Amino acid sequence: MPHVVFVPLSGMRVREEELLALGMALPGLQPRARAIGQLPALGVLTLAGLNPAHWTCSYHEAAAVDATLVEAIAAERPDLVAVSALTASAEEAYRLSGMLRRVGLRTVLGGLHATACADEAGQFFDAVVVGEGEPVWPAVLADAEAGRLRPLYRAREPFALTNAPTPRFDLLGAKPRPRYTLQTQRGCPLACEFCGASRLLGSFREKPAANLIRELHAIETLSPAPLLELADDNTFAGHGDLTAFLQALASSGARWFTESDWRLGERPELCRAIADAGCVQVLVGLESLVRAPGGMGAKNADWPRILDAIAAIQSAGVAVIGCFIAGCDGESQDSLDRLAEFILASPLADVQITLQTPFPGTPLYRRLRRDGRILPGRDWSFYTLFDVTYQPDLMSVAELEAGFRRLVRAVFAPEPTRRRQALRRDIWHHNPRLRPWASALCSAT
Ligand code: SF4
């Protein structure tokens, strides 16, 4: 029987040493990094769901590339090794492919980075999948089995999510995972300049409720009342009817996290429905105080309106994690200090701050590259969201790095972290659906 090994290069990566040290010391940063590291790689589990019956497969999550990983993969004598990587782990993926090819194995890379940099990835892998994997996966396996893998596979049309297979969650093993992932949509109807997720894999589409409920039941067989992270970019941005799925979530006893834009707060019935269905926390992209990045569309509004919407989501019993990007054009040392003050005075129950990062394939990358502002000598391993990769317009690179560290230190210091944790506990105590879990959730987020 032919055999494929799936290798997602998972987990957060940070290079900047001082920030890395801060992350270890600051209580507010660790739980989010831990939560991200716990997420199963839904993309490859979904592809595994499309494998023909005569193919066997296995799943090796890899936080690092080393000889032990290569030996473990080679021991299975696979006909194909399918790797998924984000931009920050692309260099590791290239190294892994080289090590695997040297022991005679064939490799394929897919995902956002492979899509944006197919020519580059093709120098290191036997095959590259550009765009969505599902439409071409049967052909990739058939060609691998016949020994005639092609260098490039590209879907001719967007994948209809009605045909989405149930991801092979069983590959994660019998031991329940702390978190499972489930995707209700692909892409986003908005087009923020810095965002790769919204367009690279095709237009915005929503998955039918029947598929979602089937996936939820598959997860429940491994973990009753699971903790879920919806692998969406902007849940609720479409017009699909989520009522049946929300009811299924409520009956499953699941508690779940997702991402949305702040306009959710202007839909009181939906806020109540998601709170009743066990929604714990919504990550809301608030982006920047200095300048709204291009392409934000209806997400761009005045701050009193946005803060009212956040208050409405939290009053319904769902915590909001406000997500900011530092270093947009117009940012200065002063504006970074003002951002710290704004966050510390805000009603946000949690906060995420990253550096603006021009991921390949985004309009931001094209603009900065055209203007000669992409820093030479900083390869993809710097594209972590915590390392500076471009020349800011009003500061030096060193000033942006120092200002970002100051911001992180202020926002994630022990006292404000404790205050936000108390706020989250309060929000969840007021949601009858989450009250029994309030303390446990505080330590998990
Ligand atoms: S709203 Fe979020 S997902 Fe949509 S384009 Fe903007 S950053 Fe991307």
Image (cartoon, rainbow, N blue to C red):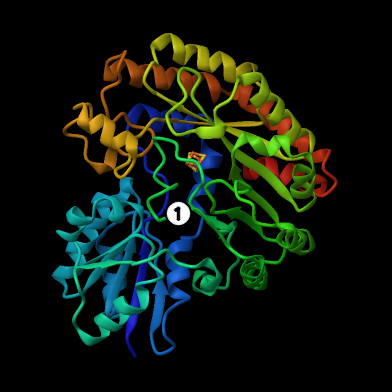
* Residue 218 visible from this viewpoint: yes
Q: Is residue 393 left or right of residue 204?
A: left
**Residue at the image position 58 percent from the left and 16 percent from the top:** 342
- Circle 1 crowding by C-alpha within 10 Å: few under 14, some 14–19, many from 20: few
Residue at left 62%, top 32%?
350
How many numbered badges does the structure rendering display? 1
As drawn, 420 above or below 171: above
Q: Secondary structure at mark 1?
A: loop
Q: Is residue 438 left or right of residue 356?
A: right
Q: Which residue is mark 1?
A: 203
Q: Position of residue 237 (x, y in %)?
A: 60, 46
Considering only vertical position in the picture, is 368 above or below 234?
above
Kindly identify the amino acid type of the residue bearing the numbered disc 1: Ser
Q: Tell me the quadrant of the picture where the C terminus can be found.
A: top right
Q: Position of residue 2 (x, y in %)?
A: 32, 86
Q: Nearer the viewer, residue 46 or 224?
A: 46
Please name the residue shown 49% across and 73% down the image: 171
Q: Position of residue 243 (x, y in %)?
A: 75, 58
At x 67%, y 71%, the residue is: 217
Above or below: residue 265 compared with residue 18: below
The image quadrant that residue 422 belongs to is: top right
Rendering coords of residue 433 (x, y %): 82, 49
Q: Nearer the viewer, residue 374 or 387?
A: 374
